[in-house]
Image (cartoon, rainbow, N blue to C red):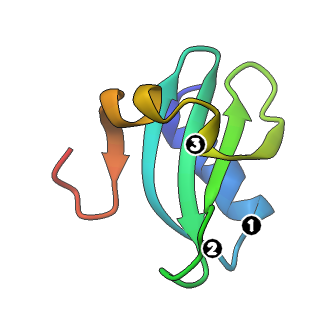
Amino acid sequence: MKTDKALEVFKKTYPDLMIVSVKDYGTDYLITAYKSPNETDPFYLMEKSGGYIRRYSIAVDPDRYYKTPDIYSADGLD
């Protein structure tokens, strides 16, 4: 699934969340999205092949999170 289709599916599944960024995590996309910027763990993994979405914590591998560039960001700079 390409990024634009993944964003479309995510928005349909979670219409109340604002997508802040997307990272390419191999077989998944790591999507940062929240209702409030004060949320402590606003991360979701979405499988590229089937669109399955699950919650995720970057505490699993913070180094990977910070080293992986955004492929989409809400500010449009990436």
| Residue 76 in the image, given as x and y percentages of width and height | 22, 57
Badge 1 element? loop
Looking at the image, is mark 3 or mark 1 nearer the viewer?
Answer: 3
Left or right of 51? Residue 62 is left
Task: Answer few, some or many: residues within 10 Å of disc 3's Cα (few below 14, many 20 plus, some between 14 and 19).
Answer: some
Badge 2 element? loop
Q: Residue at x 58, y 33 (%)?
A: 29
Q: Which mark is residue 62?
A: none
| Residue 57 in the image, given as x and y percentages of width and height | 66, 46
Tag 3 residue? 58
Q: In the picture, which quadrant includes the N terminus?
A: top right
Residue at the limit of the structure toward the top, as seen here: 26
User: Between residues 16 and 35, which one lies in front from this camera angle?
Assistant: 35
Rendered view: 11 above or below 43: below
Task: Answer few, some or many: residues within 10 Å of disc 2's Cα (few below 14, many 20 plus, some between 14 and 19).
Answer: some
At label 1, the amino acid type is: Tyr
At label 3, the amino acid type is: Ile
Q: Residue at x 64, y 34 (%)?
A: 60
Q: Residue at x 46, y 44 (%)?
A: 22
Q: Residue at x 67, y 24 (%)?
A: 48
Q: Which mark is residue 14?
A: 1
Circles 1 and 2: CB atoms closer than 8 Å: yes
